[in-house]
Image: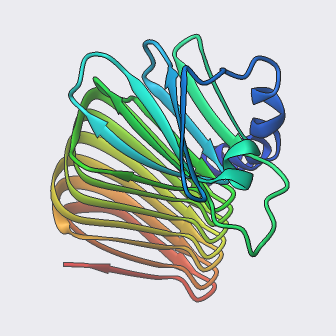
């Protein structure tokens, strides 16, 4: 039952990666202020209130705990001009199109109160300067995207990483966590605690949460995947087709 659910989520993430940039074009924000220093351009935007972040193709640096949300885009002029930002119905989206391999990606610096959903696709790197706290947090990384957060405190947390993507969390304190890594993707949780975990890895996916102690949970590893965990009562542990589960 768990693998089917997570497969559907992973497919949705791939469809989002293909469509996010075209969605932004519907109503992109205009910069309130533009500054140029040499070959570097910085644009500042009024983004309003949001608690969902979608990033495709560019890097994002996030600072939470600040009531008024701001966004500042910095990078080479050519790549900044190819980047579009929108903020609508609580969702901040940033996407870049037709960036050549030799071009440097721009970086979006974001400040806001908190986030409940973060998506990083198409080689986007979303990195947090500090930890986040929310009732429920959902993280999705796909197509070589990455999410890096020092700490998370939440009643529930859902993490999906697929297609060579990476999610890294320093410490996670939560009631329940559902984590799925597929298609050479990686999930790493270095420390923390959880009441219950549901872990799924397949097609060379990897989950390492051995530093986070959980009271109960289930784990499933298939097709060359690997799971490392620390669960007191691991009620179900299924591995086949070269999958491996290590519970300490």
Q: Is residue 71 above or below residue 77?
A: above
Residue 65: image location, x then y, percent: 21, 28
**Considering the image in quadrants, where does the C terminus appear?**
bottom left
Judging depth in this view, the residue of 235 and 107 nearest the camera is 107
User: Residue at 31% of width from left, 52% of height from top?
Assistant: 197
Residue 141: image location, x then y, percent: 56, 54
Query: In this image, 195 relative to 74: left or right?
Result: left
Judging depth in this view, the residue of 96 and 155 nearest the camera is 96
The residue lying furthest to the bottom in this view is 242
Colour approach in the figure? rainbow
Residue 182: image location, x then y, percent: 61, 66
Residue 85 falls in image quadrant: top right
Residue 31 falls in image quadrant: top right
Q: Is residue 47 above or below residue 165?
A: above
User: Residue at 29% of width from left, 39% of height from top?
Assistant: 63
Residue 36 falls in image quadrant: top right
Judging depth in this view, the residue of 23 and 210 nearest the camera is 23
Query: In this image, 14 relative to 153: left or right?
Result: right
User: Residue at 37% of width from left, 29% of height from top?
Assistant: 115
Q: Is residue 139 above or below residue 185?
A: above
Judging depth in this view, the residue of 109 and 18 nearest the camera is 109
């Amino acid at each position: 039952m768990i693998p089917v659910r997570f497969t559907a989520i992973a497919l949705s993430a791939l469809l989002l990666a293909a469509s996010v940039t075209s969605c932004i074009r519907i109503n992109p924000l205009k910069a309130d202020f533009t500054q140029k220093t040499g070959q570097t351009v910085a644009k500042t935007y009024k983004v309003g209130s949001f608690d969902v972040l979608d990033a495709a193709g560019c890097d994002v640096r996030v600072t939470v705990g600040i009531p008024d949300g701001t966004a500042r885009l910095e990078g080479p002029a050519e790549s900044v001009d190819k980047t579009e930002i929108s903020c609508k119905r609580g969702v901040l989206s940033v996407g870049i199109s037709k960036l050549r391999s030799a071009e440097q990606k721009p970086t979006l610096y974001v400040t806001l109160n908190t986030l409940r959903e973060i998506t990083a696709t198409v080689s986007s790197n979303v990195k947090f300067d500090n930890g986040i706290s929310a009732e429920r947090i959902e993280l999705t990384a796909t197509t070589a995207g990455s999410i890096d957060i020092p700490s998370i405190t939440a009643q529930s947390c859902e993490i999906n990483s697929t297609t060579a993507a990476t999610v890294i969390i320093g410490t996670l304190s939560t009631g329940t966590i559902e984590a799925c890594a597929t298609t050479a993707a990686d999930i790493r949780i270095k420390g923390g605690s959880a009441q219950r975990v549901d872990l799924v890895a397949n097609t060379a996916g990897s989950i390492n949460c051995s530093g986070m102690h959980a009271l109960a949970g289930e784990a499933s590893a298939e097709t060359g995947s690997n799971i490392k965990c620390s669960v007191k009562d691991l009620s179900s542990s299924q591995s086949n087709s070269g999958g491996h589960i290590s519970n300490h």
